Amino acid sequence: MRLLPWRFAGFVLIASAAGASIAAAAPQTAPPPPRSADVTEQLFGVTVHDPYRWMEGEKNAEFERWLGAEGEYTRAKLDALPTLDDWQKTLKASSLTAVIHRMQRVAGGRMLFIRQAAKGTGTLMLREADGKERVLLDPSTWKGGGGTPSVTNYALSPDGSKVAVNIDHGGNELTRVDVLDVATGKPSGDSVETVWGEFEAHWLPDGSGFTYTQMAPPGERTGGDPLQDMRLRLHKLGTPSSHDPMLLRAGSGAGANASFPIPSNRFPVIDFPAGSRWALGIANGAQLESTFCVAPAAKAIEPSAKWNCIARPDDKITDAAIHGDTLYLISSRGHSNGQLLSLDLSRSDVSLRDAKPVLALKDDEIIVGLTLNDAQTLAPARDALYLKVSVNGIDGVRRIDYRTGKSETVAMPVAGTASLLRANDREEGFLLELRGWTAPPKSWRYDPATHGMKSLGQDEASPADYSMVEVTETEMVSKDGTKVPLTILHRRDAKLDGSHRAIVFGYGSYGLTIQPSFKPVRMEWVKKGNIFAYAHVRGGGEKGEAWHLAGKGANKHKGVEDFVASVDRLSELGYSRPERTALVSGSAGGLLVGGAVTAYPQKFGAAIILVPVLNPVRLMHAPNGANQIGEMGDPRKAADFPAILAMDPYQQIKPHTAYPAMLFLVGLNDGRVVPWQTGKFVAKLRAADTSGRPAWIRTDANGGHGIQSSLGAEAAQWADIFAFLDAELPAPTHR
């Protein structure tokens, strides 16, 4: 199979002449095709073929050898691309000067945060009350574990004297939680493991210990899935972790609490709000809605605690917080944009039906949904409850007085998206960071006494001049006539003649809203005369929960249709042409871009597919698969199976079809989406393809799902992507 279409052969030859050593190192032929061994099944009356099922499973030596050879071949082919060196220099320069501050937290007059520069995954820093800063933990000095260590999360004790830090290695998100003394930076000797990287410790009110969500031992995991059957344990400082009692358990067996039953694919958490006699129990997972239960805080630390479960996923409660005897809830039931409710916990027979609305929202204001930002929607502080409210991607904050219930709008220093909104219920006010598509992040601390914002002194500087980049907000009309928002980043002087290469990013799962963010790597692509667009497809949360449901389950194809419509819209407006446009997505967005590849292969020029889900029919046979049932459905159920089969890109590959050029990126330590999903899809697609265009797999031996990537690694990744698109999309007619 030809790995480059004929019309780009000249560029490869030029690169070979200019850099013979690179070209000579590249393998002359691709690795041999993997073997095909079709497995057929009758599933709910449908015959399902699976010729590459042999690639599945852990420690699969044959698949690992094949994937390793593919990764080496792709690396050599990428290294030979004519514009790679230029992109590497450009993006490296933009990342070398960048300094990012994130995960800011305050307690006891101190602020902790992660400072990340070009190298490394970020250093945990401490700022004292007098403003002096010092390194608290440099994870690169952490011993053992294999692979690059990184801080995935941390939790300050109530008085700010201790911090429980999650550290993983090689991006695998399998962490040990170590307690450090904040004054000295030295370990206290308390540690617990193994904890999934996104689950921080939850300190007891007196700081004597914390609860943590522990992964089950390998022999006690349903289906061998490491993200099933998690346990909630209590660790008291100074005691062996082997003695930590189990307070809650997902699934059945010893430790399960009859008053708080938790499915095996949910994650138990207990939080202890300041100044309240109540503890908040949560069972959540990869869906917006969670289970929320309450118990007296003094009893919640006992395995026999009696819990009152106020809401379960079917009740459509997406967030909760406690202050005193009041439980605040965000509900999407009957209110697609969300409704804030309150519940008096002092009543002995309290239930969700007793909840009362707290404030009225305008029709375009949204408080329900998911973002990838470090922003609380409900942010309880000592002085008031702060509520994040979004309007067309721009965030605002409402302050709700605990005593009077009076609501007031907090004046924002600039218009933007909150990439940070964090309150501590033992501290006044909140931390805030705002950013835009072309505006670097700026951060403040809000003081309710003065109603003012004080800068944190951590504003991110732009590494280059991007004043030539502007943003156009428009809409596209999808196949069924629905108007879908489209954000377009382009040069101010861009000629609307269809001559520009374009990237369109979409996601369309979990109700996740794509909000403005400042990314120098993206800005460099646009600065050079290209287009970067964001399709706010159905399945996301841009227009509330109704927008999410409109692209979920049996409606998944609607998001795919929206995604493809964005290509036509860019062409209509004169920014690009379909053959010059690439679609980009990853993770659960693999269903979106994979669906576009298999249903509309002639509608665009290339696809970039990152750490993707591509075979949901086999969801229950993949680690982290059961966790996705709430969003994707259950392939074991007759009612869900037809929609899952229809959205499965691997199953929808058609023989004798010309497919676009594709570059796949996988992390070999990915604990969220296993690499065999990519391997199976690529193998089957190559066997069906008639275009001769490349379908390469870029592998990262020291990477996972991309959660903890360094700025340098991000720059290298996008240099590969941009060089690939330069080679695969027709060149602009002018610059």
Image (tube, rainbow, N blue to C red):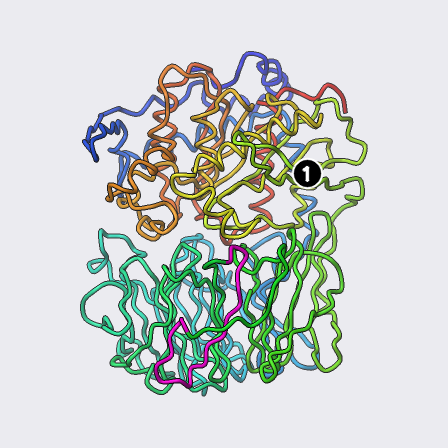
Neighbour class for label 1 at 10 Å: few (<14), some, many (≥20)?
A: few
Q: Nearer the viewer, residue 511 or 354?
A: 354
| Of 668 and 592, the residue lying toward us | 592
Locate residue 340, reporting x and y percent.
53, 68
Quadrant location of residue 414?
A: bottom right
- Image point (64%, 78%), residue name: 406
Quarter of the image containing the C terminus?
top right
Judged left or right of residue 707, residue 718 is right
Q: Which part of the image, by quadrant, shows the N terminus? A: top left
* 106 in magenta: no
Give the quadrant of residue 678: top left
Image coordinates of residue 555 in percent, x first then y, are 42, 39
Q: Residue at x 39, y 22 (%)?
A: 686
Secondary structure of residue under mark 1: strand
Q: Which residues are magenta?
A: 335-353
* Amino acid type at image mark 1: Thr
Return the x and y of residue 554 as percentages of the image width and height. 38, 39
Task: Measuring from the top left, give residue 679's x and y in whole percent.
Answer: 36, 33
What's the residue at 59%, 35% (across, down)? 504
**Up-down relation of residue 156 to residue 668 (above or below):** below
The residue indicated by pointer 1 is: 474
Q: Is residue 227 above or below residue 667?
A: below
What is the residue that sits farthest to the top in this orientation? 6
